[in-house]
Every structure is written in C-alpha cells, then in structure tokens.
Image (tube, rainbow, N blue to C red):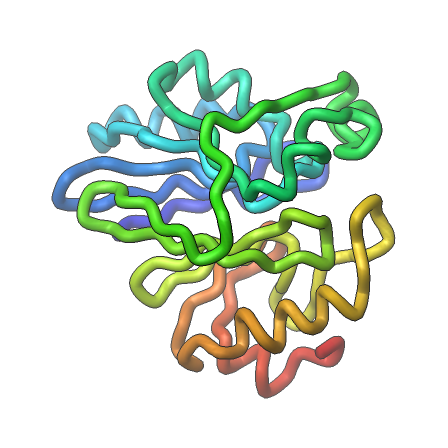
Amino acid sequence: MVIDRFLTGPIQVNTYLAYDEETKEGFIVDPGAYCPELTAKAKEAGVDIKYIILTHGHGDHIGGIEGHLKDFPDAKIVAYEDEAEMLENPQYNLSLEVCGKPVSVSADIYVKDKETLKVGNLELTFIHTPGHSKGGMCIYTAGHLFSGDTLFRQSIGRSDFYGGDYRVLINSIKDRIYVFPDDTKVYPGHMGMTTVGDEKRGNPFV
C-alpha cells in the first residue's frame, strides 16, 4: 500500500491518499479542504479513487469532499453509522466556524463496527472508536491504522465537542487501538505518524 499525506484546511488536517500499488485502486481519508496536489498525485499515479472515507464528521475533516467529488465523481463517501447526525448538521459539525460556510454531508455507505471493505487487494476494517464524537472510527489495513482524531502522537483528541466523552475516548484507545501489535503504524488526523507501541509506552493522556 502507498500512503501519501497532505495538510489541508485552516487547522492543517492530515488528509491521506492511499492505494493498492498493484491494482491502483485507492481511497482518500478525511479531505479537510480541497487539495489540488492530492488530485494531481492520484492522476499522475493512475489511481482510481473508489472511496472518500471519513473518520468522523467535524468540519475540519469534511470541507474538501465537494471539490474532490468533482475530480472523482464515482467515489463513494464512507462513514460510521452513528456519525450521520454530525455529518448532516452544520451546527454539530462546526463547519461554519472551520470552513467559513455550512457543510452538510450524507454518506453513500454507513458502516458498522468491524465491517470490512475491499479496495483492490486491500481489506479495510472499520473500528468504532467513540469519544471524540459519537461515530468516530479508525480504519485498519495490513499493519496500518488511520486513527482520525481519536489518537495522536503523544496526545489524544478533544472530548468537549458535541458527542464527545473523555472516559469513552480513553476506553476506545485502550480497548480498541492498543490491542493491535506494537509495530502497527498509526496515521492520525493531526500531527505526525506514530506507532501503537510508542503510544502505549509514552502517551501521557492514556
């Protein structure tokens, strides 16, 4: 799997372009704002974008959906089933404050906990990790975990927004992320990459 990171939007969200190098089928994770560099990279590499996958529905992670759907009109939006309320309501997703305009999104595919999805030869597993939001989720595939705003390098996501809960967030990290092997690479929604082992040993919040 090839993974490229792009910083998008006013809060510098990590937006990821990931694809199966053999089949060239791929997906975008959390397009915080429209990123022409991502589109150019995908087209240069001949990537067929099958999905735009949202780890959660906050405005800083969804502002670029509309623009990238113009570039990849066949892509399907994927989100966790409990995040529909957040995605569809600009008051809850804070898009006006973050994006400067209200954004309302309806996913094409709402997934359940531990549901899987094939992208080329990759099998993605969706893991419900509430606490930052009701329907926050992580995406796992072959030793790689996209953690959204649940877990950061030496930090964690906020729990004071609508649908957030600190205790639930900590339990999500301990019970749903720390169970992966220590060498699992973690790609968070903000800041740099880390590993499960590094966070288990040194994250001061957990």
- Residue shown at 63%/63% (left/top)? 152
Q: Is residue 161 left or right of residue 54?
A: right
Q: Is residue 100 visible?
A: yes
Q: Quadrant of residue 185?
A: bottom left
Q: How many marks on residues?
A: 0
Q: Residue furthest left?
A: 22
Q: Nearer the viewer, residue 191 or 164?
A: 164
Q: Hey, which residue is sitting farthest right in the picture?
A: 160
Q: Given the current orientation, which residue lies at the most extreme bottom position?
A: 201
Q: Residue at x 71, y 40 (%)?
A: 11
Image x and y of residue 180, in percent: 44, 75
* 200 shown above or below 97: below
Residue 6 visible in the current orientation: no
Residue at image coords 35%, 44%: 18
| Image quarter of the C terminus | bottom right
- Work out whether residue 22 or residue 119 is closer to the camera in this orientation and state it: 119
Q: Position of residue 73 (x, y in %)?
A: 38, 15
- Residue in the foreground of this view, choosing between 54 and 68: 54
In this image, 84 relative to 147: left or right? Answer: right
Residue at 35 percent across and 50 percent down: it is 116
Q: Residue 68's x, y, as percent? A: 46, 21
User: Could you say which is closer to the camera, residue 137 or residue 7?
Assistant: 137
Vertical position of residue 81 compared to residue 37: above or below: below
Q: Quadrant of residue 16?
A: top left
Q: Is residue 126 above or below residue 92?
A: below
